[in-house]
């Protein structure tokens, strides 16, 4: 019988910065043009957090029933470790998707109904990442999903539901989405770099498996560079104060050093934590700069 502590661990709270970051910077962009709507920002945060937790449980379920997690290096998985039944984890995933759906419905009803289509795409992308008969995460497309939905869609969507226009923040939100998405991808790349040996055995052809170890490490560094360039892009489109976001490099540099230094297996776990912190700092300080410089 899984305990509450097991369920909390299965939700993988350390991944939640990837859900908070896009809402932070998207709301800051809305504030920059005096269009902050606090309750919509809160609903957007609920959607983002619930989707992140739902994806975590869905991956736990799908990878667990396939046996991908039987020899896992990273944190405990509910199904793979046997502490929870697949059916229970699947219900938890659907419950989290439901919470995201209710909050998203409220946003669509008060903004624009076409947002429902975006919400449906988000849920489908979250489930079929590792779910279904041909999960795209097993085909090396996981990074694409993360970049699009936890970067572009999350940032642009958070800004749009508050401003209700593309306006002066449209391009800035798109560039900010690239920065947030690049760091969210870097978390996944580091995770998959760690899991290359076990994923090879399980037949999970992630992008890291397809690229190989050396190229994956270079790709990781490239994503950090993209995040740097995105800060500069936001600053050019809005205010120089947004350059404060470059301080994300402080936690990111240790991660880059570890990846380029050849860290493997459990030694890559701190990299995930460092990049998660870097993403949160990127969003918080870039957002702070936008609020100060408006």
Image (spheres, rainbow, N blue to C red):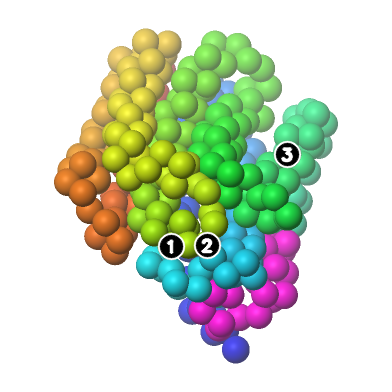
Query: What residue is at 43 percent from the left and 69 percent from the top?
Result: 72
Lower position in the chain sequence, tag 3 or tag 1: 3
- Of 167 and 121, nearer the camera is 121
Q: Secondary structure at mark 2?
A: helix
The Cα atoms of the two marked residues, 2 and 1, are separated by 6 Å
Numbered label attached to residue 202: 2
Given contact means CB atoms under 8 Å apart, are the residues at marks 2 and 1 in contact?
yes
Where the N terminus falls, by quadrant?
bottom right
Magenta stretch: includes residue 91: yes
* Mark 3 lies on residue: 121
Residue 252 in view of the camera? yes
Numbered label attached to residue 227: none
* Mark 1 lies on residue: 198
Q: Which SS does the magenta portion mostly show?
A: helix
Q: Position of residue 225 (x, y in %)?
A: 30, 27
Query: What residue is at 35 percent from the left and 55 percent from the top?
Result: 194
Residue 259 shown left or right of residue 150 in the figure? left
Q: Secondary structure at mark 1?
A: helix
């Amino acid at each position: 019988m899984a305990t509450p502590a097991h369920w909390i661990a299965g939700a993988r709270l350390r991944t939640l910065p990837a859900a908070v970051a896009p809402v932070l910077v998207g709301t800051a962009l809305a504030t920059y043009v005096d269009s902050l709507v606090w309750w919509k920002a809160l609903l957007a945060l609920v959607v983002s957090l619930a989707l992140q937790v739902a994806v975590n449980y869905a991956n736990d379920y799908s990878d667990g029933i396939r046996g991908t997690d039987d020899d896992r290096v990273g944190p405990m998985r509910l199904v793979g470790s046997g502490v929870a039944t697949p059916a229970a984890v699947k219900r938890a995933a659907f419950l989290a998707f439901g919470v995201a759906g209710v909050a998203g419905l409220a946003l669509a009803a008060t903004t624009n109904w076409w947002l429902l289509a975006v919400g449906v795409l988000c849920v489908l992308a979250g489930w079929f990442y590792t779910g279904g008969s041909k999960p795209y995460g097993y085909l090396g497309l996981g990074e694409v999903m993360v970049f699009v939905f936890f970067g572009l869609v999350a940032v642009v969507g958070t800004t749009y539901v508050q401003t209700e226009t593309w306006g002066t923040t449209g391009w800035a939100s798109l560039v900010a989405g690239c920065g947030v998405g690049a760091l969210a991808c870097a978390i996944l790349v580091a995770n998959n770099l760690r899991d290359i040996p076990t994923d090879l055995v399980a037949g999970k052809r992630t992008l890291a498996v397809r690229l190989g170890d050396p190229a994956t490490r270079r790709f990781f560094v490239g994503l950090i560079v993209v995040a740097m360039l995105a800060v500069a892009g936001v600053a050019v489109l809005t205010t120089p104060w947004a350059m404060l976001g470059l301080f994300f490099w402080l936690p990111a540099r240790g991660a880059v050093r570890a990846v380029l230094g050849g860290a493997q297996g459990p030694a890559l776990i701190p990299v995930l934590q460092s990049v998660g912190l870097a993403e949160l700092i990127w969003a918080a300080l870039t957002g702070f700069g936008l609020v100060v410089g408006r």
